[in-house]
Amino acid sequence: MAFPREIYQALEDIVGKRNISENIGICETYRSIPSQSSAHYGPSEHWTPLPQAVVLPGSTEEVQNVIRICNKYGIEFKASTTFWATMGYIGSDFAIQIDTRRMKSVKIDAKNMCAVVEPFAIAATVQAEVMKYGLNINIPGVGCSSSTLANFSSWIAFGPNSISMGQGSENVLGMEWVLPNGEVLRTGSLGAGEGWFCGEGPGPSLRGILRGIFGAAGSLGVCTKMAVRLHPWPGPADFPTYGTVPAYKADFGPNFKCYTLCFPTWEAWARSVQYFHESDVAYSGHRQFNMFGRNLKGAMLNIITDADKQLSDLEELVNDPYIQKENEKMKLDYQVIIAGFSERDMEYKEKAIDYILEQTGGWKSEMMLEKDKHDYALLYLTRLGHKNLNFVMCGAYEGTFGLSSNVWKTIQVVEEAVALKRKWEVEHDSIAATGGDSAMGSLSGIGGGGATGWEFFTNFDAYDKNSVHGTAKFVDGNQEFHNKYSFGPDFCRWNSDVRHMNGYNYTQEEHNQMFANAPQPWVYAYQYKIREAINPKNLCGTYFRTVDPKCLEK
Amino acid sequence: MALQDYRAMMERCSTCAGCKFIPFDKIKSLRFAENCPSIGYYNFMTYSARGRFQLSQSLLDGRAQLDDTVTEAIHTCTSCGYCDVGCKVTRYNLEPLEHNIELKAYAVENGKVLEGQKPVIENLKKEHSMIPGAKKANRTDWAKELNLKDLFKDKAEVAFFAGCKYSYDPKLQKMAQSAVKLLQSAGVDLGYLGAADNCCAGRAHQMGFFNEFKERAEANIKAFETAGVKIIVTPCSDCYHAFKRQYAKLGLNIKVLHVVEYVDQLIQEGKIKFTKEVPLTVTYHDPCHLGRLGEDYVPWDGKEKKIYNQIQIWEPRRPRYNGAYGIYDAPRNILKAIPGIKLVEMERIREYSWCCGAGAGCNESNPEFSAWTASERITEANATGADALVTACPWCKDNFVNAVDENGNKIEVLDIIELVRQAI
Ligand SMILES: Cc1cc2nc3c(=O)[nH]c(=O)nc-3n(C[C@H](O)[C@H](O)[C@H](O)COP(=O)(O)OP(=O)(O)OC[C@H]3O[C@@H](n4cnc5c(N)ncnc54)[C@H](O)[C@@H]3O)c2cc1C
Ligand code: SF4
Ligand code: SF4
């Protein structure tokens, strides 16, 4: 559908000529494509729809005026920041894409330990600024290239630091939202004119509505500013990096240590995790490098920590006897970082780790204590600046299975999932054969500890259609495993009920049918009411799962 | 390669934003976190390396057209190569810079060029210089008083290649003269190509004008070979890159040095000695074509292979140009050796240095964009508190001299050879 001139003119009048485009070539670069695969749809060949225009507002007021135009003409809009995830793209033909690139300020209130960030302030920049004050932020597992505000306003936002800093919902303080009806809403203490420091009040406490635990993925308007919690950082004011690109490393001094802890059985593994959940010893905890797979991780670690190595060296390294031995020792592992706020604190944390290992029969990986590996892993997990390594092996991947649950539940089924994946790796060539177990994720997806947040890295080639289709079949097969244990949808299909595989939104009728029969359907009816209140024209896509209550009343 | 040959890369790009920021591990502030001047100025995703990959797919599939807006987007890339470094922090199988230039060549092949590019290319064809208005007859005027050997009449080990900017720009000519005098006083047996001295056309390559580049390059290679040159030394970073990387691909087999490498070597050998103090705090700008794009060319003829079902590798192992081994230390060694000089670093340096804005002819075709890019660098230089910004490329120097920072302040811009000459 052609965009009427009056609409384009109205939008251009708001943002200025330089900040809007309807050129097809420009708009084509705002479509999500299959290689952006960690989108929780499963591998597919879709491109999301072509926006009618791309708009780059520069202020809350401009966002508000753009949304008013969308309301007037019934245009779908979706805000996005880095565009890494498919959830940030529009889902219909009569829609505009809001690119928030021009809004990226970071203001720090060190005394109240919070920072007010705009959408395009990526986590690396927020962290760099707050470190100067001896503070840190939670960077979710997606990495520091993504937006702090997008993560905290609109998705789960768990990662290595969640064990000490919590996930997205635990880090949000005052917020400023432009609701889809064009009104500006200020939440928490901000709503009472008392500043940004508190998410719950005095003032309207709408954290649960606007983001809940999961986040509404851009379906409830545009968050233009957000205050986020800052956490103590006992490290340097900036990273003392060394090493040759791309194998950057850093030594933070004697009060930081990054260990790869290894265990003889999953039971011992789980007990150790439980100790960390109970002891508050870990600054960060993640099963990170297992994303390269049980068979390949030792070799991959030797590639990524050495500036002169590359994937062509992989086979040789996999067959290296030393690496094989070290790899075998790291079979059931994870990484933890301990940070000492004083010498005694560090001593205590070191002792606590030794105690945990003693109790569980675990050990520290020696290879990962070699200085270059140690300093690489420490920097990697603290800044999370190499997250695109997720894609390094094949150019695309999906997280499958999931197993984000209580650790004792997870370990009962993990080897069954491993065997299923390994079987597919051996019998088909659509996914990379990395050793079955490629489970990676947080030691805890929530603050303090309690639940792991895992996914199995399933690497495929977005350019090779056989690989794409074969991977989709693999995921479909996994659903039986999930059904058997009532785990819900496979991790990689989490979003398949909010966007069609062809990239388009669901209709309300389709959602009514899907969610009327879901467990706890009144949750979706409640969400329907929320949407009716703040997004009556349903203008931001269908990531907010709703059912018309009338369908339940029948 | 043709644009179509980059299809796998286009589809394997993961939209990770690595091509828009300096390596994330290196970020020290919000202000100087970004790289890629093109998206920095124009803001739309299209202008980043990721956007360019996606635009190519749409063009090849017939959805997007080479209209004026798209043509402008394709050409407003300084070919600075940062995206390549940023991408390769995590990826081993994508070549964003090569692809950006191939996309430009695709536009050129289809007759889609910018108005500002036309006089540059026309002058290259007619007068063998990429400086509009420059005449072949005046090319060697700068060298008249220098007692430089004409290598077609006389023999010398080393050929000095000034490049268009130093040859024609009256403000810069004395820098080329200084460099020659410096090398001569250190005992270097120096000559030049005389009447056969012509534009290297490296900038034409970076603009996507492959035919024009090739024609010049082949003629120049022949001239160097006929003159029996053993070493080419140039003070221009663009020429350096052209010879070292692009000419090498076409078969040039002569050692290439930037003047900073030579001077660094001569200082270490004790052939250049400093006698005077230069009391100055300076910051150094790494020219893109000397730094991250200054790595040695390594011939490779191979193909992709998959291992472990889907893991993509190159067979044989492919050279990886990611800026790791560019020329960064030589200029810094020189500055550190000059008595009185204090070197303070900017945040974006070495392989992740910010571009001056003059690359790939953008200073001619898109002067506002080019000036903004330079201004960003002046702001960064002024943030260090340095008295002067030092560089080793005439294009950078020229672009910086006219630029002001975000507060309207200037900074003194010096060529590194000027400082060396002041100290002896
Ligand atoms: C490779 C990969 C790995 C991931 N790993 C993890 C992980 O370990 N842990 C985790 O919790 N998540 C993970 N995710 C999900 C990720 O955290 C989210 O996709 C994240 O928000 C991406 O950040 P972004 O800056 O790219 O946001 P975008 O893609 O720009 O946006 C993300 C969502 O936020 C919405 N949004 C953006 N800006 C605004 C705004 N101003 N107002 C309202 N809504 C807005 C968008 O519409 C979109 O739905 C991963 C995603 C990818 C692609
Ligand atoms: S070469 Fe430079 S200007 Fe061009 S896209 Fe890459 S980073 Fe941007
Ligand atoms: S850095 Fe490379 S993989 Fe990432 S978006 Fe840019 S071109 Fe794509």
Image (spheres, coloured by chain):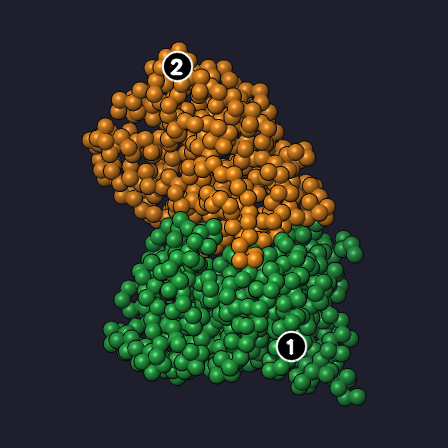
The kind of residue tagged 1 is Glu
Subunit under mark 1: A
Q: Report the disc number at residue B150.
A: 2
Please give left or right for residue A167 compared with residue A259 in the image: right
Please give left or right for residue A201 compared with residue A27 in the image: left
Tag count:
2
Name the residue furthest top: B153
Q: Residues within 10 Å of mark 1 (few under 14, many from 20)?
A: some
Name the residue furthest bottom: A553
Report which quarter residue A58 is drawn in: bottom right
Residue highlighted by disc 1: A480
Q: Which chain wears green? A: A
In this view, A447 is above or below A7: below
In this view, A182 is above or below A212: above
Q: Which chain wears orange? A: B
The kind of residue tagged 2 is Asp
Residue under the image location 57 percent in, 57 percent down: B310
In this view, B245 is above or below B62: above
Q: Measure the alpha-carbon separation of dots 1 and 2.
A: 80 Å
Residue under the image location 21 percent in, 30 percent down: B270
Foreground of the two, A393 or B373? A393
